[in-house]
Amino acid sequence: MEDGVLCQWSVFRSLLAIVQWWGFNVTVIIMNKWIFQKLDFKFPLTVSCIHFICSAIGAYLVIKVLKLKPLIVVDPEDRWRRIFPMSFVFCINIVLGNVSLRYIPVSFMQTIKSFTPATTVVLQWLVWKKYFDWRIWASLVPIVGGILLTSITELSFNMLGFCAALFGCLATSTKTILAESLLHGYKFDSINTVYYMAPFATMILAVPAILLEGPGVLLWFHTHTSIASSLIIIFSSGVLAFCLNFSIFYVIHSTTAVTFNVAGNLKVAVAVMVSWLIFRNPIAALNAVGCAITLLGCTFYGYVRHMLSQQPPGTPRTPRTPRNRMELLPLVNDKVDDKV
């Protein structure tokens, strides 16, 4: 009886974690698109900087004030030698995501972001000379095919937004590869990651945001009506962006890797549907088919990764690195690489 109650509570806890993760993720994406499109605040660098500031404050409150999460201590030297390069790539990743939202629909942007597994595998193969099982390569075929079909049939195609989203995938993959070496020896969770990276990211982005978008922001203040309500929405998106990182920490500890993978792909479908209901951007039938193929390909990729990781000891596993010093570097858990 007690086992049954515990099992039901575990299932309920997992579902609750997934739903709140979906809620924060989709809300942040929709709010950012609303800021760019409806509020006419077309300044992705400034929006990203606000997100970093809110995340830095939120992480400080959670770790230092509320003490909900223990601080992972990092040597001052490692903060500049390891954390700063990661923060730079992290900053580029977030900025490119917001730039893509500025120019293309949420549905198209989310579909392109699903290309990340393919770019990660290719970069690890090219940069780290890692060898992957043929089933990993086969699982990438529907992802690439779906992206191509979606791009060709996108009715609201914009080259700048497309390139920003695509390079955002490369930035995410680069961050994963760098984390394998730069963060070796540290077991960061999402909150500690934000605690260390958000201040660096703010420092990196503040000057370009002021120089490139400062005059435009000042003009927006003078010409836009309902300044107070607009600023509430803009800063609320920053607060929710931090809450998203906290929700990722919760969902990681409440679900298995397979559940997380499937839920992550379903989250993309939810974001696409909600964005269409709100913004009513036109979606062609073949475009929807391409999006579905991409999401199924991502799910299949996650399944193949999981099956290969469950092989008995002594069986060649994927990815396999040639016998050299890089074998000592751990692979970063794919589950934590979903920050907005």
Image (cartoon, rainbow, N blue to C red):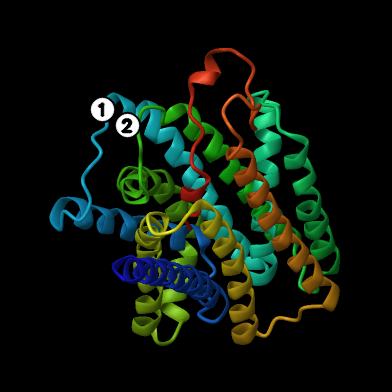
**Residue 25 versus residue 230 in the image, above or below:** above
Question: In the rendered structure, which amino acid carries the disc numbered 2?
Answer: Arg
Q: Is residue 257 found left or right of 51 in the rendered image?
A: right
**Residue 154 versus residue 251 in the image, above or below:** below
Identify the residue at image location x=58%, y=12%.
324
Question: In the rendered structure, which amino acid carries the disc numbered 1?
Answer: Asp
Identify the residue at image location x=68%, y=60%.
161
Can residue 65 be seen here? yes
Residue 250 location (% of width, % of height): 36, 59
Which quarter of the picture shows residue 182? Answer: top left
Identify the residue at image location x=69%, y=58%.
112
**Residue 157 versus residue 165 in the image, above or below:** below
Decide: few, some or many residues near mark 2? Use Cα within 10 Å; few <14, some 14-19, many ≥20: some
Secondary structure of the residue carrying tag 2 is: helix
Which residue ends up furthest to the left in the rendered image? 65
Placement of the N terminus among the 4 image quadrants: bottom left
Identify the residue at image location x=38%, y=71%.
8
Q: Nearer the viewer, residue 204 or 137?
A: 137
- Answer whether labels 1 and 2 touch (C-beta < 8 Å): yes
Can residue 214 be seen here? no
Q: Is residue 241 found left or right of 108 in the rendered image?
A: left
Q: In the rendered image, which residue does mark 1 sit on?
A: 75
**Residue 129 versus residue 214 in the image, above or below:** above
Secondary structure of the residue carrying tag 1 is: loop
Q: Nearer the viewer, residue 46 or 136?
A: 136
Which quarter of the picture shows residue 193? Answer: top left
Q: In the rendered image, which residue does mark 2 sit on?
A: 79
Residue 241 location (% of width, % of height): 40, 64
Residue 215 location (% of width, % of height): 47, 63
Q: Nearer the viewer, residue 223 or 113?
A: 113
Decide: few, some or many residues near mark 1? Use Cα within 10 Å; few <14, some 14-19, many ≥20: few
